[in-house]
Image (tube, grey):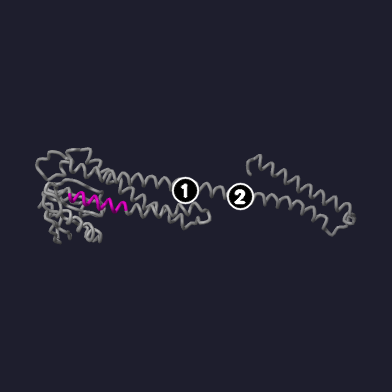
Amino acid sequence: MRAILIDDKGNQQEVDVTRKQLSKDFEMNMRDLRPIFSLRQMPTISRRGKGIVINFRAIKILVTAKQVFVFNLTSKKIVSVFIPDLIEKIKSREKNIHLEHVVLETAMSFILAKTKSNFTKVSQIIERILTEFSDEGKVSNEIFEELLAVKKKLSKLSKNVHEIIEILDGILEDEEEMKELYFAKKVQDVDEIESILENNLEQLEDIENRIDELDENIDDTQEILTLKLSSRRNRIIQFDLILTSATGILAVLAVITGYFGMNIRSNIEQSHFAFWVVTAVMILISIVSGIWLWRWMKKSKIL
């Protein structure tokens, strides 16, 4: 595998390394290097043999006392952003600052910046969609599909942030584990590494809280929209019920009208009085039937 090798002076060179070679040189088990050589590995910060393995998925690093191996060179940002930044910080570090801590802090800063950028992009899309949801006229299947896709991105981002938070929490709770992140034989205190981890943990927790708030806003908006759509469907059903009832009443009147329109002579059709009586009865039936149906639907809470 290709890697960039950076020494403690900031000099770099591209090298070919194997898991077996690294395992032998730094007294590590081959399985300890799995987070670096495998793509689907959980985020890791762990001391193994004479090295520290750092894996944040995008960043894969092996740190030793005087060397740093940076992997995942297929990522343009690793090559163009992270490695130059790391070299600059190694060259400008003070003598009392440990190499391994400079590397860890730079890696954490890179991941934090990437996480913030991803959250900003996702939140902007979600805010636009939620704004469109406030206008019922703009609601469409395409918006729902876009919201579903962006919710998946938000969920993935939340998962990644939570995994790193769990790692940092676990290290901060164990002083011995923090001491292992020093290559010095005698560690007087762990203030340096604790400060680095605490600072990044606070910022990641802030992002996690903002993700949770955004997720709650999405759920609340979906609930409100669901209620609005249900209300709209209910109004349509009510309107359809009223039209059906009116059609039923008119059908009854049509039967009466049809009776008088048959080609059967009864001499009633020649009476003007009978015409007005039948007309009045039909109107009365329409009004009484309409009022009765309206009251019944109100009483049954249909309307």
Q: Residue at x 66, y 43 (%)?
A: 297
| Secondary element at tag 2 | helix
Q: Which residue is mark 2?
A: 237
Expressed as whole percent of the image width and height from the top left, the position of residue 214 reads 40, 47
Q: Which mark is residue 83?
A: none
Q: Which residue is mark 1?
A: 222
Count the numbered circles shown: 2
Foreground of the two, 170 or 48: 170
Expressed as whole percent of the image width and height from the top left, the position of residue 11 reads 12, 58
Foreground of the two, 126 or 85: 85
The residue range painted magenta reads 102-116
Expressed as whole percent of the image width and height from the top left, the position of residue 267 reads 90, 55
Left or right, 79 with respect to 133, comes to left
Q: Label 2: few (<14), some or many (≥20) within 10 Å?
A: some
| Secondary element at tag 1 | helix
| Residue 121 shown in magenta | no
Name the dominant secondary structure of the magenta segment: helix
